[in-house]
Amino acid sequence: MSDRREMAAAVVGLAAAGGLALSAGGQIWVTATVERPEPLPPVTEQLAGAELAPLVPAGGLVLLAAAVALVAVHGAGRVLVGLLAAVAGGALGWSGLRTLLTDLDVTATGVVTSGTPGSTLTAEVSAAWPVLVLVAGLLAVAAGLLTVLRGSSWPGMGRRYERAAAAVATPVRRQTDEDRALDAWRALDRGEDPTEEPGEQR
């Protein structure tokens, strides 16, 4: 894979991971139901990922910023961006994994308060969103490590446009008789004999 393709893969990976994290963080992860003593009806509350795992939306924003910075910086700065992206990806992965492994009744109790003695709380998790965050974290870690290992050799943003500008530079105008006469006079002014080298630029 060429340097440019590696860089594109890292940028797309970070942007995709950031977008997935922000999307999943805004979804409902847990539906908590508080069963209260009769005759009080049960209370149901839905908890978004951002409430249960505040690092998820924050990590998503960091990864989107890293995707933009990856294009703008180069050299050591790009390696630092890769390290930051890998750390953010690790935080995302841990947030998703912790939600899947933690006792959700305990997790929801820290967020939902019934205020009624004798109440019991049960929680139902939508596992797809924490899993999506875990996938986003792994993708960000992979893109970040790729940047750390290979980013210093990737081309900077300016080089592409410099080459493009050179490619479309104004072509050399065909030399006319007047141009050749002026060149001869300039050679005479410099003390040179314009007839010694008869080669003419066409």
Image (spheres, grey):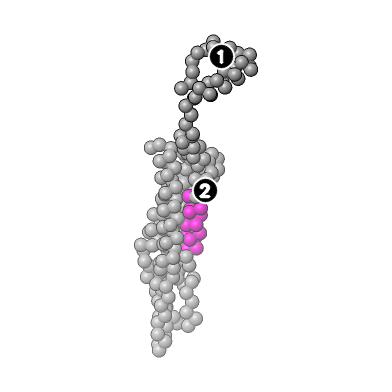
Q: Quadrant of residue 41?
A: bottom left
Q: Residue at x 47, y 65 (%)?
A: 50
Per the model, the C-alpha gap separating discs 2 and 1 is: 55 Å
Which of 101/92 is in front? Answer: 92
The prevailing secondary structure element of the residues shown in magenta is: helix
Left or right of 53? Residue 131 is left
- Against 123, residue 95 (above or below) is above
Residue located beneath label 1 in the image: 194
**Where 33 falls versus 29 (above or below)?**
below
Badge 2 density bin: few <14, some 14–19, many ≥20, Cα 10 Å: some
Residue 29 makes an appearance in the image: yes
Residue 7 magenta-highlighted = no
Q: Which residues are magenta?
A: 53-67
Secondary structure at badge 2 equals helix
Of callouts 2 and 1, the N-terminal one: 2
Residue 51 versus residue 97 in the image, above or below: below
Q: Residue at x 44, y 80 (%)?
A: 119
Give me the residue at 44% from left, 63% from top.
25
The answer to whether marks 2 and 1 mark residues whose Cβ atoms lie closer than 8 Å is: no
Residue at the spot of label 2: 69
Q: Nearer the viewer, residue 195 or 171?
A: 195
Q: Residue at x 40, y 61 (%)?
A: 130
Q: For this rendering, which residue is in front, 82 or 113?
A: 82
Q: Name the mark nearer the viewer: 2 or 1.
A: 1
Label 1: element kind: loop
